[in-house]
Amino acid sequence: MRKISELLASIPLFVFGVIPSLAFFVWIERNMALPWVGTWIGWPWIYIDGNGPAASIGFDLVLVAFFGVVHSALAGRAGRRTYVVVAGLVSFFFMALWQPTGVILYQLLPSALGASLLSFFVYWGLLLAGARTLAQVESPARFLGLDRSTSSEKRTLWTGGLYGKVRHPLYLFTFAAWILAPMMSLDRLVFIVGMGIYVAIGVRREERRMRTEFGPAYDAYLARTARFVPLKTKKAIAEV
């Protein structure tokens, strides 16, 4: 009975959290489109009138800002399950309200099928590498909110593997997956720029929390590792 109750309790987590979040990453890889889903649901739910893509870009950047505010408000405060569900719902409405510009900036391969296959393997390969790196510090079950166990044990600062070179390898792999695409749309570029601004701001708050939690050990870690790109920097502590 306990397993059945846990399974039933996990259904909202999957429906409202995990599935929309996974769809969100598929949507990005498909250059901000899920044609078979968007057409069925009727995306976008609103249309921003304007001459050219400027109005759409402005609205989309507001969506990115709202996305960032919600994530920052929840990070470190809400329980993991709450965070995953709210993040999934925000991702769903993010996709539903996104204003497509319809502009393609470049396509490296003449074959649409070849570009699609290359995009798929590069994108998901990089995200998988990031997930494997994250698994060194947090179990997938806990990250997705599936692990409901509580522990009073104090966390330890992990500095092994790629974490010994950069403090945020998950961001490194995620942005690499977004940027290294055989076809780049204006929508995807707007998203990357907006998320880049959010991460540049949000990561400082995250590192301040880490310094509070781990103290001098994290100061030493800051001094010998870079934030995103694996290059040493002596200004790491001053930047936080």
Image (cartoon, rainbow, N blue to C red):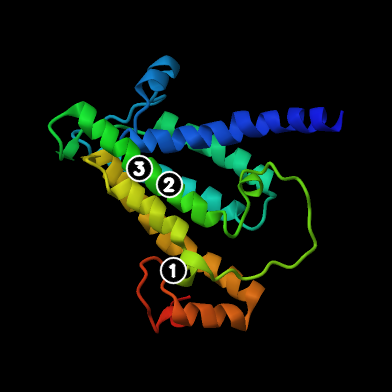
Q: Quadrant of residue 33?
A: top left
Residue ID for mark 2: 127
Identify the residue at horizontal 12%, vertical 32% (top origin).
110
Q: Find out whether the residues at labels 1 and 2 contact each other: C-beta distance under 8 Å.
A: no
Amino acid under label 2? Leu
Indicate left or right for 89 with 165 as reference: right
The crowd level at tag 3 (other Cα within 10 Å; few <14, some 14-19, many 20+) is: many
Q: Is residue 36 above or below residue 71?
A: above
Give the image location of residue 66, x and y in percent.
Answer: 47, 46
Q: Kindly identify the amino acid type of the residue bearing the numbered disc 1.
A: Val
Q: Nearer the viewer, residue 139 or 13?
A: 139
The Cα–Cα distance between marks 1 and 2, rounded to whole angstroms, is 16 Å
Q: Which mark is residue 123?
A: 3
Q: Secondary structure at mark 1?
A: loop
The kind of residue tagged 3 is Tyr
| CA neighbours of label 1 inside 10 A, class few (<14), some (14 to 19), many (20+) | many
* Mark found first going from the N terminus, 3 or 1: 3
The residue singled out by tag 1 in the image is: 166
SS at mark 2 in the image: helix
N-terminal label among 1 and 2: 2
